[in-house]
Amino acid sequence: MATNIFFKLNGDEISYEVKDHWTLLHLLREEMGLIGTKEGCGNGECGACTVIVDKLAVNSCLYLAIEIEGKTVETIEGLASTSGTLHPIQQSFVENGGIQCGFCSPGMIMSSKALLDENPDADREEIKHALAGNICRCTGYIQIFESVEAVKGMGGQNE
Amino acid sequence: MKAFKYLSPTTVEEAIAFHDQHSETAKYIGGGTDVIVKVKEGWLEPDYLISLKKIGEMSELHKNDATGELSIGAMVTHATLEKSLMIQNEYPIIYDAVSNIGSLQVRNVGTIGGNLINAVPSADGAIPLIALDGIALLHGPDGERSCEVKDLFIAPYKTILKPREILKKITIPPQAPHTGSAYIKFGRRAAMELPLIGIGVLLSLGDDLQTCTRARICLGVAAPTPMRAFNAENLLVGKKIDKKILIEAGKIAANESKVRDSVRGKAWHRKEMIRVQVRRMGLKCLEIIKNNS
């Protein structure tokens, strides 16, 4: 069963024929070739597949593609400018050691973006609460929290 | 994942009609944070998934200022409840419980109704709604019926819902003045974890701000289904509430619980935590009442 859906992806209007049982993660990675979003557990436990749908961080592995009809989707590919300039959150992760192996980074950064878009002055507790669903096995999280906190001093997170 | 057809009704009646057409091969889906996992793992093999997302009335969160009744649509997400200032201020026990379910990604999508009808012994969402004397409104092929939220649960993973029946909403009757409520999900860590034990306490005091007029002590993971510690509640009603009597209530609640050993923890540990946390949540209720008076 396939349905044609319309949605906004990283600022572009998209029309795409999706199968009813595709997850959003499958649509992004396997069909559209946007492999920045990662699949970790596939069960909503690890947050590696986090993308933003209508301003909310969601696990794309548990979100059906057909349900993004009419919605706005943001993925890690949409953050840096077309000229390659990193988004302030990405730049901050690079500068503050928020990235080691990098597998959790797209999810971490999308969760951070959803948080900072809603609450630019998030404190450490709020950052922890928002990132609790993103597992990192390298950094011990401290540098990640510092990376998110440091965005405040980098001229905001406007695109 | 197994292929299925996704249906998107806009009314409860239409959803039930879809289910009637496809009987055993259809399954309702709410936020999907449980159903999709089960389909991926092959525990569910539906040919049709009937989404409840487009049924507008099921996503409404509304407090009737005239009657004081709170209405929570079954499709209201945990995050919607968590972010609501009305919930934070007037129903802190709901906030305490939903703000630590799963992760933010799960709470942004997962719904309170889904949390209830999954009927896991550890369902954080159930405890506050039981403490608040919540009423569940069910809609099935034969029309509507309602029951107390505590009577929804029959056994682990089993509710009274009949085939094709939908949990539509939960209503919370108006709260008495001088009411405080609090919940703690007690476990090894806060995030992405089921509780070792869940403890919810609600206290209403009379105009003297001392005498208990109503007490609810509700426990999760303390029995096969969410339970009320009636003996402990009865101890408190009519008495002046202080730390001493809350300590006693904690002991009684621990004794009437039906805790057992599981992979997540031992029965004796659960009992100890009920004893301690009933007192702490009771004191928190008193603090809330004091701050609001």
Image (spheres, coloured by chain):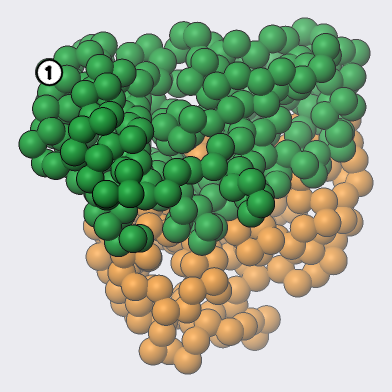
Chain colours: A orange, B green
Q: Quadrant of residue A10?
A: bottom right
Front residue of B206 and B161:
B206
Q: How many marks?
A: 1
Q: Which residue is mark 1?
A: B268
Q: Position of residue B39 (x, y in %)?
A: 63, 23
x 11%, y 27%: residue:
B248
Q: Is residue A152 left or right of residue B268?
A: right
Chain for disc number 1: B
Q: Is residue B113 above or below residue A100?
A: above
Q: Is residue A81 above or below residue B235?
A: below
Front residue of A67 and B139:
B139
| Screen quadrant of the C terminus of chain B | bottom left
Q: Is residue A94 visible?
A: no
Q: Quadrant of residue A95?
A: bottom left
Q: Position of residue A131 (x, y in %)?
A: 40, 57
Front residue of B136 and B79:
B136
| Screen quadrant of the N terminus of chain B | top right
Q: Position of residue A97 (x, y in %)?
A: 30, 72
Q: Is residue A156 above or below residue A101?
A: below
Tell me which amino acid carries mark 1. Trp
Q: Position of residue B241 (x, y in %)?
A: 19, 40
Crowding near pointer 1: few (<14 within 10 Å), some, many (20+)?
Answer: few
Q: Residue furthest front?
A: B208
Q: Quadrant of residue B188?
A: top left
x 79%, y 27%: residue:
B50
* Secondary structure found at label 1: helix
x 38%, y 57%: residue:
A129
x 78%, y 12%: residue:
B25
Q: Is residue A52 left or right of residue B265?
A: right
Q: Is residue A139 left or right of residue A7?
A: left
Q: Is residue B158 visible?
A: yes
